C-alpha cells in the first residue's frame, strides 16, 4: 500500500469517494442520477459489494459496468436482479418502506436539507425552469434516511430555496414529525469540501469533517448561509486511497467511452 | 379488434386536435416515430401527458402543438434541461402552455388508478412538497380506518395512448419487456391505444408465462416501425443513442436550429427512416 497523501485528487473526486464511504453492503439505496450514481457505484465496486442499488426506472439490485446517462439505460436492466413496473417501484418498494437510503443531488439546498430542483424564481413565472422533482419528493420522505451530495457554491447552497421540491427538515427541529413524516430525512451531506451532519436538535447541517487541505474559510465562502462547524475539533476526511481513486477513474473512463463513443445517429 | 395499419393512418385515425394524449415510455421504448408522425400531421391544442416528457414533447411543444402539459420530470435525462419546453414556460414561445406538475409517485399512481377504473389514486406522498401548493389537483384524504392523511390525485384517463414495444404476434397481442415503465397502465387507462412494434412474429408460444403481454383486444392499432423508439432504445434490439441525447441539448438551445432540425428529420422524413437511424446501435449478436 502506498501512502495516500502522495496521491493527488480533485475536490469532485474527494466528494464522490467520501459519499461512497457512507454506504454499506446491507444498504438498499434509491439512487439519484449524477453525483449520487457515481458514489453508489464506487461503493459497490470497493467496500460494499453487496449493496442493493435501485433506480427509479424499476431496476432493483443493478450492477452497471458504466454509469448510466439516464435512470433507464439498458444496462441497468440487464444487470439487475429484477426489473419492476414504475408504479410497483413507487408503491411497494419506496412507499412500502424497503429503501434504507435515498441518495439525492440538488440544484438548490438550504441548511435544513430542503432541496429545490424545480424552478429558480417564482413558480408561475420562473426565471429558470429546472427539470422538477421526478421521484425525489417521495424518495425524500419514504426512504428511511436521505444522503445528499453536491458541489458547493453560493448559488446552490442558499439561505432560502425558491421551491420546496423535496422536504428535508423544513424549518428545522421536529418539522418532519409535525407533518406526519416518520422517516429520518437528511442525515448526511457530502460536498466537494466537507462532510456535514444535521444538529441533533435544530437539524441544521453542521460541518463535521473538512476534506484534506480545505479551510473553514473556503467552506464559508462557497456557502450562502452562515456555516456552523462542529464544536469539537473538526475531523479531516481521509484522503482517497489508491484503490478508491482508481475505481472511480476507471468507472468514469468507461462511462465516457460508452456515452460519447456512439457514432452520431443519422437523425442528427 | 386490433388492426395493423401503416403509422400514418394509425395516427390519423386515432389522434385529433384537442385530444388528451399520452406518449409513454420511461427512458426505454419511447414512441418517437409516433410522435414524429403526429408532428407531421400538425395536430393542435393537445394536452400532453407523460411522466418524463423528454425529447418528443420538447419537439411537440416547440412546434406549438400543446395547450397543456402534465408531467413529473421535464428534463433531458442525464443531460439537463428541455430547452423548447423551457422557452414555452419561461417566455411563452412559440405559445404559452398550461403546466400540471406531479411527482413520479403521483403520476404512476394516477395512471394505475386510470387502469383500475378508479376516480382517483391514494398514496403516501407530497408531504412538505411545494407541488401540493401550486397544483390544485393534489389534494388529501384521511384513511377511514387509521385517520392517516394521504395524498389524492385524479386518475389519468387519456383519450389515446401511444407506446412502442418489442413485438406483436400475428393476432396483434403485444409483448413489452425490459424496463416496462408505465406502459401497461397507460394503455389500460386510455380510451384507445396505438402501439408501434419492432417486428411481428407468428406466435408467442415460446414466451415465459409471466411476461408483460397486452392482449390484442386492449389495443386499437399496431404499426410496424423498426427503430421506432430512436434515440431511445428497444431492449433486445438496439441500444440507447446517448450521443443523440447530448446533441439534442445544443439543437434545442436555438430556435432556428430547432426548426431546421425538425424540417429535415421530421417533416421531410417518414416512419421508414427509423430503421436506418438505429443500424449502428444494434448489438453484434
Image: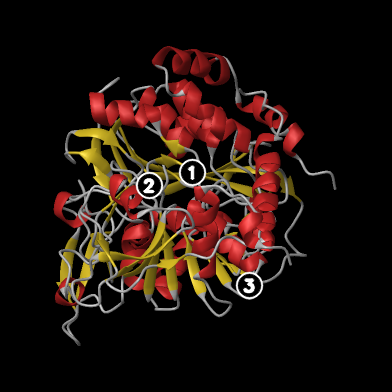
Residue B73 in view in this figure: yes
Q: What subunit carries mark 1? A: B
At horizontal 24% and vertical 60% (from top left) the residue drawn is B153
Q: x and y percent of residue B187 in the render? A: 46, 53
Please tell me whether residue B47 is drawn above or below residue A215 in the rendered image: above
For the residues marked 2 and 3, what is the alpha-carbon distance in whole angstroms?
33 Å
Viewer-closest of B98 and A203:
A203
Q: Report the disc number at residue B73.
A: 2
User: Mark 1 and mark 2 in contact (Cβ < 8 Å)?
Assistant: yes
The mark lying in front, picked from 2 and 3, is 3
Looking at the figure, which quarter contains the N terminus of chain A? bottom right
Q: Residues within 10 Å of mark 1 (few under 14, many from 20)?
A: many
For the residues marked 3 and 1, what is the alpha-carbon distance in whole angstroms?
29 Å
Horizontal arrangement in the rendering, residue A247 relative to residue B95 (left or right): right
For the residues marked 2 and 1, what is the alpha-carbon distance in whole angstroms?
9 Å
Q: Secondary structure at mark 3?
A: loop
Q: x and y percent of residue A121 in the render? A: 19, 38
Q: Report the disc number at residue A47.
A: 3
Residue at the limit of the structure toward the right, as seen here: B285
Horizontal arrangement in the rendering, residue B107 relative to residue A83 (left or right): left
Viewer-closest of A7 and A266:
A7
Q: Residues within 10 Å of mark 3 (few under 14, many from 20)?
A: some
At horizontal 29% and vertical 27% (from top left) the residue drawn is B88
Q: Report the disc number at residue B187.
A: none
Task: Name the residue tied to disc 1.
Answer: B77
Q: x and y percent of residue B243 in the render? A: 62, 33
Amino acid at each position: 500500500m502506498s501512502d495516500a497523501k502522495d496521491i493527488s485528487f480533485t475536490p469532485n473526486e474527494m466528494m464522490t469517494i467520501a459519499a461512497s464511504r457512507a454506504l454499506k453492503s446491507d444498504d438498499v439505496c434509491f439512487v439519484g442520477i449524477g453525483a449520487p450514481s457515481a458514489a453508489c457505484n464506487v461503493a459497490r465496486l470497493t467496500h460494499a459489494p453487496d449493496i442493493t442499488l435501485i433506480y427509479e426506472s424499476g431496476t432493483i439490485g443493478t450492477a452497471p459496468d458504466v454509469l448510466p446517462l439516464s435512470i433507464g439505460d439498458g444496462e441497468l436492466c440487464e444487470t439487475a436482479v429484477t426489473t419492476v413496473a414504475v408504479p410497483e417501484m413507487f408503491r411497494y418498494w419506496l412507499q412500502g418502506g424497503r429503501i434504507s437510503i435515498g441518495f439525492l443531488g440538488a440544484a438548490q439546498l438550504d441548511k435544513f436539507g430542503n432541496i429545490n430542483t424545480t424552478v429558480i424564481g417564482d413558480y408561475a413565472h420562473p426565471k429558470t425552469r429546472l427539470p422538477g422533482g421526478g421521484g425525489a419528493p417521495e424518495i425524500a420522505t419514504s426512504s428511511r434516511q436521505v444522503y445528499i451530495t453536491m458541489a458547493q457554491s453560493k448559488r446552490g447552497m442558499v439561505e432560502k430555496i425558491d421551491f420546496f421540491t423535496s422536504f428535508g427538515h423544513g424549518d428545522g427541529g421536529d418539522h418532519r414529525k409535525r407533518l406526519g413524516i416518520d422517516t429520518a430525512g437528511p442525515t448526511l451531506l457530502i460536498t466537494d469540501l466537507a462532510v456535514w451532519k444535521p444538529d441533533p436538535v435544530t437539524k441544521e447541517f453542521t460541518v463535521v469533517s473538512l476534506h484534506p487541505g480545505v479551510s473553514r474559510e473556503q467552506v464559508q465562502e462557497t456557502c450562502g448561509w452562515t456555516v456552523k462547524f462542529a464544536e469539537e475539533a473538526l475531523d479531516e476526511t481521509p484522503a482517497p486511497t489508491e484503490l478508491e481513486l482508481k475505481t472511480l477513474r476507471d468507472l468514469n473512463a468507461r462511462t465516457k467511452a460508452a456515452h460519447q463513443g456512439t457514432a452520431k445517429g443519422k437523425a442528427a | 379488434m386490433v388492426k395493423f395499419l401503416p403509422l400514418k393512418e394509425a395516427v390519423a385515425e386515432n389522434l385529433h386536435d384537442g385530444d388528451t394524449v399520452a406518449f409513454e415510455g420511461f427512458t426505454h421504448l419511447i414512441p418517437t416515430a409516433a410522435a414524429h408522425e403526429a408532428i407531421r400531421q400538425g395536430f393542435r391544442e393537445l394536452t400532453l401527458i407523460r411522466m418524463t416528457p423528454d425529447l418528443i414533447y420538447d419537439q411537440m411543444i416547440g412546434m406549438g402543438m400543446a395547450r397543456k402539459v402534465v408531467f413529473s420530470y421535464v428534463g433531458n435525462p442525464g443531460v439537463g434541461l428541455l430547452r423548447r419546453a423551457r422557452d414555452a414556460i419561461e417566455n411563452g414561445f412559440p405559445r404559452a402552455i398550461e403546466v400540471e406538475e406531479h411527482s413520479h409517485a403521483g403520476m404512476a399512481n394516477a395512471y394505475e388508478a386510470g387502469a383500475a377504473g378508479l376516480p382517483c389514486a391514494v398514496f403516501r406522498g407530497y408531504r412538505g412538497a411545494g407541488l401540493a401548493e401550486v397544483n390544485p389537483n393534489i389534494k388529501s384524504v384521511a384513511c377511514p380506518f387509521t385517520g392517516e392523511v394521504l395524498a389524492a390525485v385524479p386518475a389519468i384517463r387519456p383519450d389515446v395512448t401511444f407506446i412502442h414495444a418489442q413485438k406483436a404476434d400475428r393476432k396483434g397481442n403485444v409483448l413489452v419487456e425490459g424496463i416496462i415503465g408505465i406502459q401497461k397502465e397507460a394503455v389500460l387507462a386510455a380510451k384507445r391505444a396505438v402501439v408501434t412494434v419492432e417486428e411481428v412474429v407468428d406466435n408467442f408460444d415460446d414466451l415465459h408465462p409471466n411476461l408483460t403481454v397486452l392482449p390484442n383486444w386492449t389495443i386499437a392499432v399496431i404499426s410496424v416501425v423498426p427503430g421506432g423508439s430512436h434515440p431511445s432504445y428497444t431492449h433486445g434490439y438496439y441500444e440507447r443513442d446517448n450521443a443523440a441525447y447530448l446533441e439534442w441539448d445544443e439543437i434545442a438551445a436555438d430556435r432556428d436550429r430547432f426548426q431546421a432540425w425538425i424540417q429535415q428529420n421530421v417533416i421531410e422524413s417518414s416512419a421508414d427512416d427509423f430503421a436506418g437511424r438505429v443500424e449502428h446501435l444494434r448489438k453484434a449478436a
